[in-house]
Image (tube, rainbow, N blue to C red):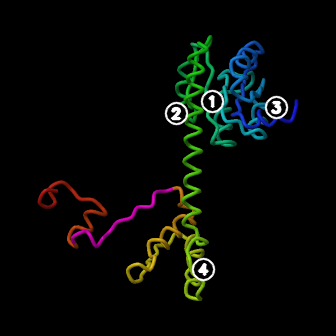
Amino acid sequence: MHSAEKKRDMNQPSLLIVDDEAGVRQSLQMVFNKSFRVLEATSADEAMQKVSEEKPDLVLLDIVMPGADGLAVLKQMKSIHPECQVIMLTALNTARTAFAARGTGAFDYVTKPFDVEELRMRVEHALEKIQLSRELERLKEEVGRKYGVDHVIGKSKQIVDVFKAVSMVAAKKSTVLIIGESGTGKELIARAIHYNSDRRSRPFVVVNCAALPETLIESELYGYEKGAFTNA
């Protein structure tokens, strides 16, 4: 393969077809080889090896594999590569099992003999989910870099000590109290702690307590029962 073709293939999303029937693999190869870098596996062991080494974006997995349980293979795939989206291929008599597989990590399922356009649509939906997830992760990383300690301006001993404290407490699960005069960057430091912690994927919620009546702060933050006070 020429280097330009190889580079183009590597830039394409990858699709792993897992089926012991050569005819099925060949048919699926013809359907998707223009849009995906297509990989094939004929057994559960080979599929696990491909998932581990190639990290495919999508997997078309036959639910009935010789000597293997398709649901067990699905769980193992998701444990090795949680980000991959798996679409189960199933005969009509195993459709109920395939439907149950959606509760254990499968994105969707299609029945054999499958309608090509329906299968394309389901694969496209799975790919859209992957792309949205990756875009979300990219945005989170971008926000995290924006609020990293490297982006907090200051070289004095005091601010360097603050940077050290941020790095220290970000790794812990302790509650942090940040005090200082208005405009000194308390929220910036709070964001730096959040986006440098292992909680960076969780929401960062800002509440302006000064804008809330003192008697309602507890209710606004923690909720209240209907009728607890007027108009509640």
The Cα–Cα distance between marks 2 and 1, rounded to whole angstroms, is 10 Å
Q: Secondary structure at mark 1?
A: helix
Q: Residue at x 57, y 13 (%)?
A: 92
Q: Residues within 10 Å of mark 1 (few under 14, many from 20)?
A: many
- Tell me the element at label 2: helix
Q: Earlier in the sequence, mark 2 or mark 3?
A: 3
Vertical placement of residue 177 versus 50, above or below: below
Pointer 2 residue: 103
Expressed as whole percent of the image width and height from the top left, the position of residue 68 reads 72, 27
Q: Which residue is mark 4?
A: 164
Magenta-tinted stretch: 202-213
Residue 5's label in the rendered image is 3
> Callout 4, which amino acid?
Lys
Label whose residue precedes the other's in the sequence (4 or 2): 2
Q: Quote the CA–CA distance across marks 4 and 2.
A: 44 Å
220 vs 183, left or right, is left
Q: Which residue is labeled 1 in the image?
A: 71
